[in-house]
Amino acid sequence: RRWHVAGVHGSQVALDGADGSGLLITLDASARTPTGEQFLKESRDWLESKKVKVLRVEAAQPVTGAAGLEHFALETEAAEQKAAMDYYVVHQPNGGATLAARLPSADPEVRKEVEGIARGLTITKKIAGR
């Protein structure tokens, strides 16, 4: 599977997959990075404000074997199209990040790739608060 950079805007990097998948990585200072539970609420509220139906919620929980990494997932439907939404929150000494992936299908291989990107994310320079 090949992901390519679709765009960079400030502290955000967007990646696109050949199958229509998309991944948005947002970097921020540690103090401004939400918990998994906070990001779940924020994401769900935003989707519902856009009239996207949330069909199923997988609660935020720590990722086994990955300190400072949390995951949750949503199954959504908009315009009669279902999508799996995979989310990660990263907390590291130099800063934090949120990852939001839209996956047109719940393909376990694509979900593993997104988890691999989240596990491999390393913030090498201190991110200052705004």
Image: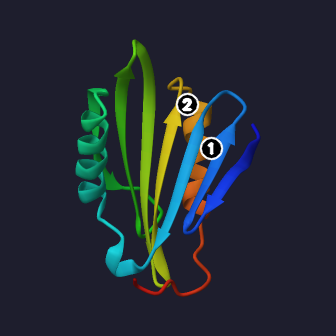
* Residue at 42% from the left image edge and 79% from the top image edge: 29
Q: What element carries label 2?
A: helix
Dividing the picture into quadrants, the one containing residue 70 is bottom left
**Colouring mode (rainbow / by chain / secondary structure / one colour):** rainbow
Report which quarter residue 21 is drawn in.
top right
Q: Which amino acid does label 2 sit on?
A: Pro
Asked which secondary structure carries label 1, the reply is: helix
The residue drawn where x is 31% and y is 37% is 47
Query: Could you tell me if the residues under marks 2 and 1 are in contact, i.e. CB atoms within 8 Å?
Result: no
Q: List the single residue furthest toward the top.
A: 80
Residue at horizontal 40%, vertical 85%?
129
Quarter of the figure that contains the N terminus: top right
- To which residue does mark 2 refer? 108
Q: How many labels does the image show?
A: 2
The kind of residue on which mark 1 rests is Glu
Residue at position x 40%, y 83% from top?
A: 130
Q: Label 1 crowding class (10 Å Cα cut-off): few <14, some 14-19, many 20+? A: some
Residue 94 in picture, x, y percent from top left = 50, 84
Q: Residue 46 carries which label?
A: none
Label 2: few (<14), some or many (≥20) within 10 Å?
few
Q: In this view, does 37 lie above or below 103?
A: below
**Residue 73 position by quadrant:** top left
Would residue 125 be found to the left or right of residue 26 on screen? right
Disc 2/disc 1 C-alpha distance (Å): 9 Å
Q: Check the image and report above or below for 21 versus 78.
A: below
- 12 left or right of 57? right
Q: Which of 46 and 84 is in front in this view?
A: 46
- The percent position of residue 128, horizontal first and vertical second, equals 46, 87
Residue 113: which numbered mark, if any? Answer: 1
Residue 84 picture location, percent across and down: 44, 30
